Amino acid sequence: MNEQIRYEQYSAHYYLAMAAYFSSENLSGFENFFLVQADGERFHAMKFYNYINEVGGRVEIKGLEDLKNDFESIQEVFELALKHEQFVTSRINKLMDIANEEKDYATISFLKWFIDEQIEEENTMGTILNKLKRIGENGAGIMMLDRELAQRTFAAPAEEGN
Ligand code: FEO
């Protein structure tokens, strides 16, 4: 789970790098989308942080390696983001496997939130990627999507007691 804190923080960094790329491309809606996504990832990291502490574990914060900052196209960014979310899903599934093996019911309950969250995360990236494939790289469609993504805001789920 400490390793998962690192993955979630890595995700926040990755999406911040993507936000910065869009800022440099003057696409502020896409930038906003990834800034909000990075907020979500920090929230995920803190959920693990809080849970480990809550059950009497010892949180260890691990370092992050440098990551990709330059991208070829808008579509490439979303392809990488979707691939990354699929990787995170596989990590969550692995944690769930361990929790099941160990009959750790509290952790199974905790991880269920992330199982559902990952369905949404992959769906979000996949839906935008499909839109981009239809729109192509240029034109009014991109500007419309940019305006749509500018509306996204981050709100931590209310049920979080941690
Ligand atoms: Fe923390 Fe995007 O999964």
Image: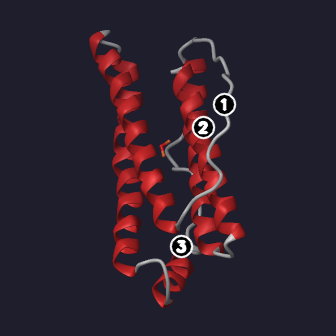
Q: Secondary structure at mark 3?
A: helix
Q: Residue at x 46, y 65 (%)?
A: 75
Q: Secondary structure at mark 1?
A: loop
Residue type marked 3: Leu
Q: Which residue is mark 1?
A: 64
The answer, for residue 162, to whether it is visible in the render is: no
Alpha carbons under labels 1 and 3: distance apart: 28 Å
Q: Quadrant of residue 61?
A: top right
Q: Residue at x 66, y 62 (%)?
A: 21
Does label 2 or label 1 sit earlier along the sequence?
A: 2
Q: Position of residue 16 (x, y in %)?
A: 66, 52
Front: mark 3 or 2: 2
Q: Residue at x 41, y 58 (%)?
A: 125
Q: Residues within 10 Å of mark 1 (few under 14, many from 20)?
A: few
Q: Secondary structure at mark 2?
A: helix
Marks 1 and 2: in contact by CB < 8 Å? yes
Q: Which residue is mark 2?
A: 10
